[in-house]
Amino acid sequence: MSGKVIAINISEKKGIIKKPIEVGNFIENFGLEGDAHGGDWHRQVSLLGQESVDKMIAMGATGLSAGSFAENITTEGICVYQLPIGTRLRIGETLQEVTQIGKKCHTGCEISKQVGDCVMPREGIFTIVLEGGTIKAGDTITVVE
């Protein structure tokens, strides 16, 4: 099972849309260098599939792009929210482990206000970085057996 990276996204503050960057430097036991969500905890990196973003667009959400759901890695071709906790992923040069599926949404999420729903609480996932390195758009995501 594999997919690919569509975008790497970063923000200096929590609770805001992340902006795409060319290359992300992911640090072991921290997450994305320079990102507000990095740190020594179980939600170092967030991932969301482009397929999930497309569901929201089909429901009428407008103005969505990579990082709109504050995800660090926008993926394609792999159903990330169906991966069991503990699954290890080789993403670019990194090795990451799935630690959480979904999360409680921010109160008053703009997307939820617009269309009455948001996919991130159900379909976004979180990982920790076991081996650091760089990730860029186009890199492969592979489930490590």
Image: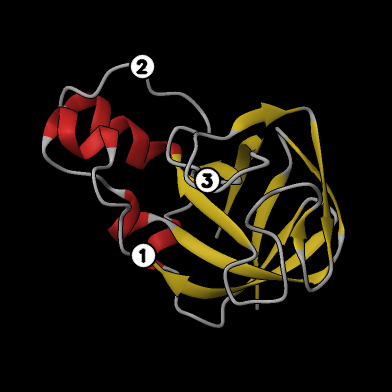
| Relative image position of residue 132 (x, y in whole percent) | 86, 63
Q: Residue 71 carries which label?
A: 3
**Image: 43 above or below 66:** below
Could you give the CA–CA distance between mark 2 and mark 3, rounded to whole angstroms?
16 Å
Question: In the structure shown, which secondary structural element does the residue marked by tag 3 occupy?
Answer: loop
Q: Earlier in the sequence, mark 1 or mark 3?
A: 3
| Relative image position of residue 35 (x, y in whole percent) | 71, 48
Label pair 1/3, CB-CB below 8 angstroms: no
Residue at coordinates 11% horizontally, 38% vertically from top-left? 116
Residue at coordinates 29% horizontally, 60% vertically from top-left? 122
Left or right of 50 in this view: 30: right
**Image: 17 above or below 2:** above
Q: Nearer the viewer, residue 12 or 97?
A: 12
Q: Name the residue under label 2.
A: 63
Mark 1 Cα within 10 Å, few/some/many (few <14, many 20+)? some
Could you give the CA–CA distance between mark 1 and mark 3, rounded to whole angstroms?
12 Å
| Relative image position of residue 83 (x, y in whole percent) | 45, 70
Question: In the structure shown, which secondary structural element does the residue marked by tag 2 occupy?
Answer: loop
Amino acid type assigned to the residue bearing label 3 in the image: Glu
Question: In the structure shown, which secondary structural element does the residue marked by tag 1 occupy?
Answer: loop
**Image: 7 above or below 60:** below
Residue at coordinates 60% horizontally, 68% vertically from top-left? 127
Amino acid type assigned to the residue bearing label 2 in the image: Gly
Mark 3 Cα within 10 Å, few/some/many (few <14, many 20+)? many
Mark 2 Cα within 10 Å, few/some/many (few <14, many 20+)? few
Where on the picture, by quarter, is residue 58? Answer: top left
Q: Mark 1 points at which residue?
A: 103
Residue at coordinates 65% horizontally, 78% vertically from top-left? 145
